[in-house]
Image: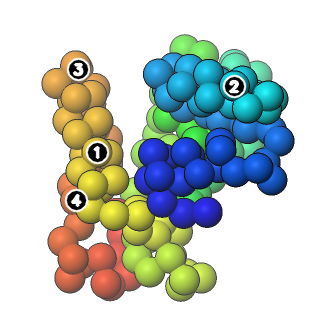
Amino acid sequence: MQGSGTDAGQEMVEHPGIDLIAFTGSNEVGRRINERAGGLLKRTSLEMGGKNAITVLEDADLELALSGILWSGFGTSGQRCTACSRVIVHEKVKEELEKKLTAAAGQLTLGNGLDENVDVGPVINKRALEKIDDYVQIGVKEGAKLLCGGKIASESQSLEKRQLL
């Protein structure tokens, strides 16, 4: 089912053919789901408030870690509840992984998600794009340093295969 969380989620929680609700998201929404599902005697599995992290230890295979980070962060344009949103790296491998990740992310191709040569397709709608940009701007204001990316593609740019801005 596609749609906003409010519309699709409400229908799914209340649908008589659904006996178990698994949800990953905010505490507020998870609490509402649990209250409604409980009233309908449905089981719930809730992961609320998490910011999915990948942890890279000092003895990690950095190529494997890089592959996992790229897939989790950029696969499906980062539009799944389990997409990586943080990378926690041991200080001994931080610099090397940062260089590898920056170089690899800078080579990802943005474009039509149906094109097998494209790495990152579009997000679902303009509001999602604006929300992502808002989070980037918050991060920058809080001291984050952009190593690549950070610009929204225009509509004409998004129709062409191109490297991430």
For badge 3, the amino acid type reads: Gly
Measuring from the top left, give residue 105's x and y in whole percent.
45, 53
What residue is disc 2 on?
Answer: 39
SS for callout 2? helix
Q: Work out how far the residue at label 1 is from the one at label 3, CA to CA, in angstroms.
A: 19 Å
Label of residue 56 in the image: none
Q: Identify the mark nearer the N-term, 3 or 2.
A: 2
Mark 2 Cα shell of 10 Å, populated few (<14), some (14-19), many (≥20): few
Amino acid at pointer 1: Lys
Is residue 120 or residue 6 the one in the foreground?
6
Residue assigned mark 4:
152
Q: Is residue 51 visible to us here?
A: no
Give residue 124's position: percent from left, percent from top.
Answer: 41, 64
Q: Position of residue 125 (x, y in %)?
A: 34, 64
Judged by depth in the image, the label closer to the viewer, 4 or 2, is 2
Which callout, 3 or 2, points to the residue nearer the camera? 2
Local secondary structure at mark 3? loop
Secondary structure, mark 4, is loop
**Residue marked by disc 1:** 131
